[in-house]
Amino acid sequence: MPTHPFELFAVDGLLTDEEREIQRTVRAMGERELRPHVAEWFEDGALPVRDLARKLGELGVLGMHLTGYGCAGTNAVSYGLACLELEAVDSGLRSLVSVQGSLAMYAIWRYGSEEQKREWLPAMAAGERLGCFGLTEPDAGSDPGSMRTTAKRAGGDWVLNGTKMWITNGSVADVAVVWARTDEGVRGFLVPAGTPGFSAPEIKRKLSLRASVTSELVLEDVRLPADAMLPGARGLSGPLGCLNEARFGIVFGAIGAARDCLETAIAYATEREVFSRPLTSYQLTQQKLADMALELGKGVLLALHLGRLKDAGDLAPERVSVGKLNNVREALDIARQCRTILGANGVTLEYPVLRHANNLESVLTYEGTSEVHSLVIGRALTGEAAFR
């Protein structure tokens, strides 16, 4: 009887009953309601975000690791496992949940006023309202400190000007968390959709993350009241703290994409006959599968270890970088290798492997490129910052 790659590492025994149940529930929902449609969404470059957000809200995964305000209050490992199962279907679906919960909701939950939390979080947890997170700019990606978006005082109000780029959920969001440079340093602002001067045109013609809404945010003399500012965030530590939350989900999510690729490759090679024998019976194929299973298993063990550290309050930023760098890089290699096992069939949307590979090309870059995470790890090892 074939052994699942995770069974080689006895992963199931490392989880609590509650964690296993959450993982099973999210996987069942993904298989039932998401997977049958995801290839079409990817091909069309369109996603029914509102409908999906309500379903995900009913499932309880939006902001699930936050407490209060309608959030489920699960532990970090449970949130990670939910990300794993969502990204096993498609990275765009995990991105929807990550941006909603770990970026937009977390920013309000961690840095917002009580009034802001009560106004936005319950509806966002239910999927009735959507959020996005505006940090990256056309000329300020890996170096957010060079952002050009500004917020200037005008009487009792703030006036924002600037452009944000590559913003997930931007065109469908009810509120944008926008980071801008002020005379007091970088501050965060809540910009409701429909505010005069604010627009969010969708970015089209993508070759990756097609089952995801990606947008530009344009702010032209956007006037906001004083209470639109997030009072608890001062300087870049605010947005970077949010990014660490989202990166944690990616550590698990990338493993989900890799697992789906490997499961697909094993199933395909078992049924595919070459020279009158199953493809799985050849040594070269088994070598590929064994190598991929090793990297997949090491990746899930790393993710679980980081999850336990997070639940214990001991997850340093450089440890998140270790997880993001390793797991996304290895997941992308697994997706590419699985494509070779499927041959020409691997380039079609009948199978998920090249779709995952295309998506992982974006995941490799966003929320910290591999180069940046390498330098974070290098700084931790040497005490020397090599970013400039």
Image (cartoon, rainbow, N blue to C red):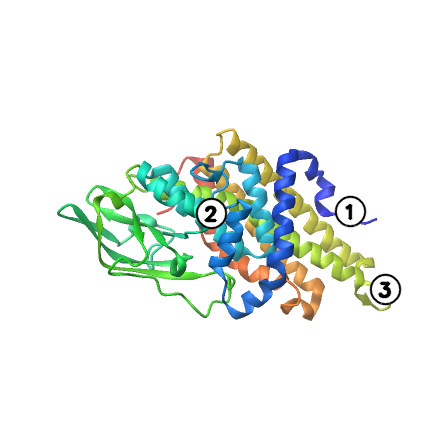
Q: Position of residue 48 (x, y in %)?
A: 50, 62
Q: Is residue 236 visible?
A: yes
Q: Is residue 227 above or below residue 206?
A: above
The mark nearer the N terminus, 3 or 2, is 2
* Label 1 close to label 2 by CB (< 8 Å): no
In the structure shown, which secondary structural element does the residue marked by tag 3 occupy? strand
The mark nearer the N terminus, 1 or 3, is 1
Q: Which mark is residue 126?
A: 2
Identify the residue at image location x=70%, y=65%: 342
Q: Three-letter amino acid code at disc 1?
A: Thr
Q: Position of residue 362 (x, y in %)?
A: 49, 58
Give the CA separation, mark 1 to mark 2. 38 Å
In the structure shown, which secondary structural element does the residue marked by tag 2 occupy? loop
The mark nearer the N terminus, 1 or 2, is 1
Residue 260 quadrant: bottom right
Q: Which mark is residue 277?
A: 3
Identify the residue at image location x=48%, y=53%: 96
* Label 1 vs label 2, nearer the camera: 2
Q: Is residue 195 above or below residue 20?
A: below
152 with respect to 257 (left or right): left
Q: Which mark is residue 3?
A: 1
